[in-house]
């Protein structure tokens, strides 16, 4: 049998190859004909200009909106988005109007976010309970702890709870996770506490939420996307235009602003940064510009409508009654030495208060009525003590003293004498003891700077 296989093995290989290739060709072609490549894209509705709305368009817009330059927790940061959620929906109150009508659609996903937020734990240093996230909040954004306490007391994930989460999100923008980490690390090092490794790798995003979907649910983001796309369609129907070049320039402007804030040793060009951001988001330039065109149409439509609103002349009459009145005002400010010009100044002031307070409290910025004794402060933290000295300095030169006029032969003779040599040894310990014969070699072998001082 083995001899038979060896004799005809070439024909076996040829036959096997023909069968494999034929099966691939037949079944591959058959599956292609039977199962057409169906893209997961379907028509989900009609926009206000009667154009079709597809799920892929809404999904891309939702992904684009869910990360922005203002809220940058997590690995994905979208600097092309200058904060549409906060600027156009939160600050304007448009989100409140949408949720008042469509909250039942959002409630199911929001319930999951609300439960995670209620059960969230905040960081506390294992060796210093006073060093914690909530302590930082109470010092820099005190309203945050009030909102968190209210959240803990909320009973159900209703519309009121949604607005509360929106307020927490809004206040949280004042204390980004990176800033929180920097403050905690600074205070750990300042108080000379044992190192907590969590501070170096843990994320300090509120409730651990990394995107707007985590905060409010995918349905809420989709609702905003549909709003933008519908208003953009209405704007086009009304004659509002945003060209490709205009949208591209605005995107590059957003990149430029973000690039200026980056603390990098080597700055990259705005165009390269723009290309890199497209790669991170998985978009091409055309797709990104198309999304931003819709956002700009959405903004232009509302700006034009609000500027053309008819206003009753009653407000103008009311304004004219006091428009010509004048008030003399005085501007008071602290001296330059008492102002905080940076966050580091505030931290330095806090360290100073901690050392001079007999009973230090982080929650208060008041200066102490009584201070610790100067001797105790100097022993505890000498860096907080200043002493003033008045120095009188006089300066001369070799030419002014006449030393430069002394002949080298006379200088050598004076230095090698016993009495003068002992005097030099008392001033320069490096010279050391030596015999009369060795003194010349000692002076020749010492450092040039020292020799100059000896001379």
Image (cartoon, helix red, strand yellow):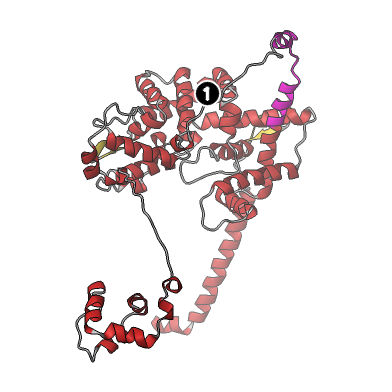
Q: Position of residue 383 (x, y in %)?
A: 30, 46
Q: Residue furthest right?
A: 239
Type of secondary structure dominating the magenta stretch: helix
Q: Position of residue 52 (x, y in %)?
A: 70, 33
Q: Which residues are magenta?
A: 298-321
Residue shown at the point (58%, 19%) measured from the top left: 97
Q: Give the residue number, with chain letter if any, for mark 1.
A: 105
The quarter of the picture where the N terminus appears is: bottom left
Judge left or right: residue 417 versus residue 339: left
Between residues 347 and 42, which one lies in front from this camera angle?
A: 347
| Whether residue 145 is visible | yes
Residue shown at the point (39%, 58%) measured from the top left: 393
Crowding at mark 1 (Cα within 10 Å: few <14, some 14-19, many 20+): few
The quarter of the picture where the C terminus appears is: bottom left
Q: Position of residue 430 (x, y in %)?
A: 25, 77
| Whether residue 430 is visible | no
Q: Is residue 93 magenta?
A: no
Q: Position of residue 266 (x, y in %)?
A: 54, 58
Between residues 100 and 419, which one lies in front from this camera angle?
A: 419
Between residues 249 and 372, which one lies in front from this camera angle?
A: 372
- Looking at the image, residue 223 lies above or below residue 389: above
- Looking at the image, residue 377 lies above or below residue 429: above
């Amino acid at each position: 049998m083995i001899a038979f296989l060896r004799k005809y093995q070439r024909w076996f290989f040829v036959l096997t190859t023909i069968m494999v290739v034929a099966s691939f060709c037949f079944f591959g072609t058959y599956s292609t004909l039977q199962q057409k490549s169906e893209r997961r894209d379907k028509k989900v509705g009609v926009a206000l200009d009667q154009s079709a709305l597809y799920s892929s368009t809404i999904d891309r817009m939702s992904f684009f909106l869910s990360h922005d330059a203002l809220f940058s927790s997590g690995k994905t940061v979208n600097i092309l988005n200058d904060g549409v959620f906060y600027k156009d929906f939160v600050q304007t109150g448009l989100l409140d109007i949408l949720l008042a009508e469509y909250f039942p659609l959002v409630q199911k996903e929001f319930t999951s976010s609300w439960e995670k937020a209620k059960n969230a734990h905040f960081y506390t240093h294992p060796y210093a309970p006073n060093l914690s996230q909530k302590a930082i909040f109470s010092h820099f954004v005190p309203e945050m702890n009030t909102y968190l306490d209210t959240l803990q007391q909320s009973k159900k994930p209703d519309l009121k709870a949604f607005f509360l989460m929106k307020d927490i999100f809004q206040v949280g923008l004042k204390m980004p996770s990176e800033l929180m980490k920097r403050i905690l690390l600074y205070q750990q090092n300042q108080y000379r506490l044992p190192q907590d490794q969590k501070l170096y790798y843990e994320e300090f995003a509120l409730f651990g939420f990394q995107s707007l979907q985590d905060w409010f649910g995918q349905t809420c983001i989709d609702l905003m996307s549909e709003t933008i796309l519908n208003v953009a369609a209405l704007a086009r129907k009304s004659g509002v235009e945003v060209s490709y070049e205009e949208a591209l320039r605005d995107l590059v402007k957003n990149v430029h602003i973000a690039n200026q804030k980056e603390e990098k040793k080597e700055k990259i060009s705005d165009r390269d940064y723009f290309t890199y951001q497209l790669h991170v988001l998985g978009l091409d330039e055309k797709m990104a510009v198309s999304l931003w065109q819709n956002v700009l149409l959405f903004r232009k439509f509302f700006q034009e409508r609000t500027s053309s609103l008819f206003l009753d002349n009653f407000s103008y009459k009311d304004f004219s009654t006091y428009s010509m009145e004048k008030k003399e005002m005085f501007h008071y400010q602290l001296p330059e030495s008492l102002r905080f010009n940076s966050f580091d100044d505030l931290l330095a002031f806090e360290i100073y208060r901690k050392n001079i307070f007999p009973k230090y409290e982080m929650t208060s910025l008041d200066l102490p009525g009584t201070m610790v004794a100067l001797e105790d402060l100097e022993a505890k933290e000498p860096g907080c003590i200043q002493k003033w000295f008045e120095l009188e300095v006089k300066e001369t030169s070799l030419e002014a003293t006449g030393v430069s006029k002394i002949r080298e032969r006379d200088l050598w003779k004076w230095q090698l004498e016993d009495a003068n040599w002992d005097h030099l040894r008392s001033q320069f310990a490096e010279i050391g003891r030596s015999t009369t014969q060795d003194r010349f070699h000692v002076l020749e072998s010492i450092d040039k700077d020292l020799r100059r001082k000896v001379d």
